[in-house]
Image (spheres, rainbow, N blue to C red):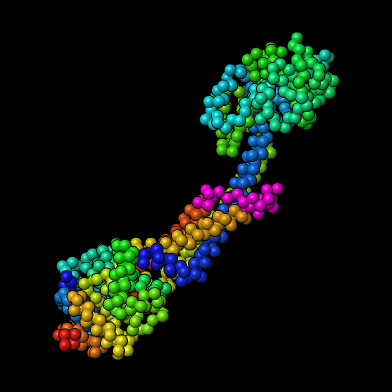
Amino acid sequence: MSNIQAENLVKSFGNGEAAVLAVSGMSFHISTGEFIGIMGESGAGKSTLLGMLGAMNAPTSGRLMVDGIDIYGLKNEKRADFRREYLGFVFQGFHLIPYLTVLENVMLPLAVCSGSRKEKRGMAIEALSKMGLSDKADRLPGEISGGEKERVAVARAIVNEPPVLLADEPTGSLDSRNSRDIMSIFRKLNSSGITIVMVTHSEECARYAERILYVADGKLVGDQPGPKVCQN
Amino acid sequence: MTLTSISVRNLLRRRGKAVFILAGLVTGIATAVGIFTFVETVTEDINHKMEQYGANILIVPRTENLALSYGGLSLGGVSFEMEEIKESELAKVHTIKNASNIAALGPMVLGVVSVGEKRVMLAGVDFKASGILKPWWHIDGVFPKTSGAVLGAEAARVLNLSVVDSLGIGGHDLPITGILQPTGSQDDHLIFTSLSDAQQILRKTGRISMVEVAALCKDCPVDDMVGQIGNVLPGARVMAIQQVVRSRMEMLMQFKKFAYGVSAALLFTGGLVVLVTMMGSVRERTEEIGIFRAIGFRRAHIMRIIFMEAGIISGLAGVIGSFLGAASAGAAMALFGGGHGWHIPLSQTTIFGAILLSLLVGLTASAYPAALASRMDPNEALRAL
C-alpha cells in the first residue's frame, strides 16, 4: 500500500518581501503502483516537491498523507523510520559513499534494520543481481562507470523493498543508452508493484511514466496520462 | 554493514585526521599517565621508606613538664616522675579502625638506675617488637629470651662491660646477652632489658613510659591513625614522627598539584584537538550524513557513528598513552628517582584508568560535532551540494 495524498502543499523560503514561494498550493493523489513523472523547467519546484514527498522537506502549509498517515505530523525520528521503511531514494548525481564498496553501499539502508548480517548481505546481493551488477560487488564507486553507479544507487534504493521509489533526475548524468537501461529497470520495478515518482527534464524518460505532473512556478499546471511506453 | 563498520571504514579513509586526533589525545593521556605514575611511584617510595624507618607514631603521657628527647626525636612531655600510661590500656590500640595497619606496638618503661657509681638510664622493651621498631639495631650477641640485658655501645664502654659479664641492678642479676653496635642515637647510652624486668627493677609494674608504634601507612594517612589512637587513649599524647618524610610529602603534594594542573591543561588541549578536527570532519561529510538521514538513519544513528569513531580513537589513545606515559615515568624515575633504573610501573588500573580518561575526553569533545551532525537536515544537506 502506498496511497499518497498531497493536500494544498505550500513551501516558501525566506520571510517577508524576500520570501520565495517554491511550491504554491499543490494537491494531487498518487495511487499504489503508479509510475509518475514530474516535469517542469529548472526552478519550477520539482525537486522541492520531491523533497516534500520524501518526508525530508516539511511544507510551510498543507498536508501529505501516505496511507492515511500525516507524514509531517510525525516526530522527526518517526519520519526517519518512515523514510527507511516506505521510501527508496535515487538522488540526482548518485550520491554513493566513496569509501564503501558497491555491496556495502547497497547494504547501507539495512545497517539500521534488524536481521542477521548474512540475511542483509543476501538482500543486497539480490538487489545488485536485479541491476546486473553482481560481479561489481567488491568494487569501490570510483572503480565503476556512471551507468553502473546509477544502477548501484537504484539497488540501494530498493534493497529494503520499499513500496515507493523517489527518483530525482535519475538519468541526468547518463548517456542515452544508460538512460534507457535505467528506465527499463524502473519499468520492471513498477511492474513488480513499486510506486515510482520520478523528477525528470527528459521527454524520453517521461515517456515511461503512466502519468505526468507538470510543474511551473511552484504550481501544478498539468496532470496528464503518459504515453505508457512501459506497457507498449 | 553496521554502524560500527561505517565508523571504522571512515576512519581508515580519513587516516590523516584520525592520526591527528590520536596524536592530540595520546599527548594528553601520556602526560597525565606519566605524571600520575611518577608521583605515585615517588609516593610509594616515600611510604616504603617510612615503613622501613621503624616507629612512626609515639604515645607518651600527657604532661605539662619539660620535654626530653630520645633518639634525636621529640618525645614530647616524657618525664619519669609523672603518672605513666597503664599497660592494661594498650590493648585498646588494637581496637582502632586502622588496627590492621599496625605492624608493631612497642611499650617502653624508662627509669634511672645505678650501676656501681654510675647512673644509667634503664629501658624496658619488648625485644620482639624491637626487630620491627628499630630495624637499624645490630647486636653483637643475642637478645635475651628470658631474663637478661642488652647494652648500648656507649653504656658498655663507660660501664666497662661485655657479653660475658652480668649486671647487678636493684638486687637483680641480669646476664648481658648482647651489645648493640653504635647507632648514633641515644640508644647507645641505655641499658635494655625486658619490659617485665624493668618494671620490677623500677617499681613501675603495669605502667608504661611511652609506646612506639610502627604503622604501615601506605594505605592510610598516619594522621588518621594518630587521631584514632588519641581517641582510645584520652590520657595520652599521640604524635606522628614525620619530620623529613612530612616535608618530602608536602613537597610532593605541591608537585602533585602542579603536575595535575599541567595534565589537565594538556588533556583540555587534546579535547580541543578532537573537537576542532571532528567539527571539520562533520562538515566534510555533509553529503554522506545527508544520505544517511535521507535513507532513514535516525539522529541517534548519526551520533552513534560519530561517537563510535571518537571512541575507537580515544580507546586506542588510552592504550598508547598509558604505555608511553609509563615509559616516560620510568625514564623520569631513572633520571630523578635514584637507582630505580628503567622500571616501568604500569598497572592494569593505570591502563584502564587511562582508557577511561581518554574516552571521557574524546567523547565529551565529540558531543558537539555529533549533535551538529545529527541535527543536519537531509534535504538541506543534499541541496547544498
Query: Quarter of the image containing the C terminus of chain A?
Result: bottom left
**In the image: residue B178, left or right of residue B36:** right
Residue B62, given in percent of the width and then of the height, sits at 63, 22
Q: Residue at x 29, y 73 (%)?
A: A126
Viewer-nearest residue: B326 or B79: B326
> Is any atom of residue B331 visible in this view?
yes
Instruction: Specify the quadrant of the image occupied by residue B124.
Output: top right
Q: Which residues are magenta?
A: B329-352
Viewer-nearest residue: B26 or B127: B127
Viewer-nearest residue: A50 or B76: A50
Q: Residue at x 55, y 29 (%)?
A: B99
**In the image: residue B44, left or right of residue A21:** right
Whether residue A210 is situated above or below residue A194 in the rendered picture: below
> Is any atom of residue B250 visible in this view?
no
Residue B125, given in percent of the width and then of the height, sits at 68, 22
Instruction: Specify the quadrant of the image occupied by residue A36.
Output: bottom left
Q: Residue at x 72, y 23 (%)?
A: B143
Residue A76, given in percent of the width and then of the height, sits at 28, 65
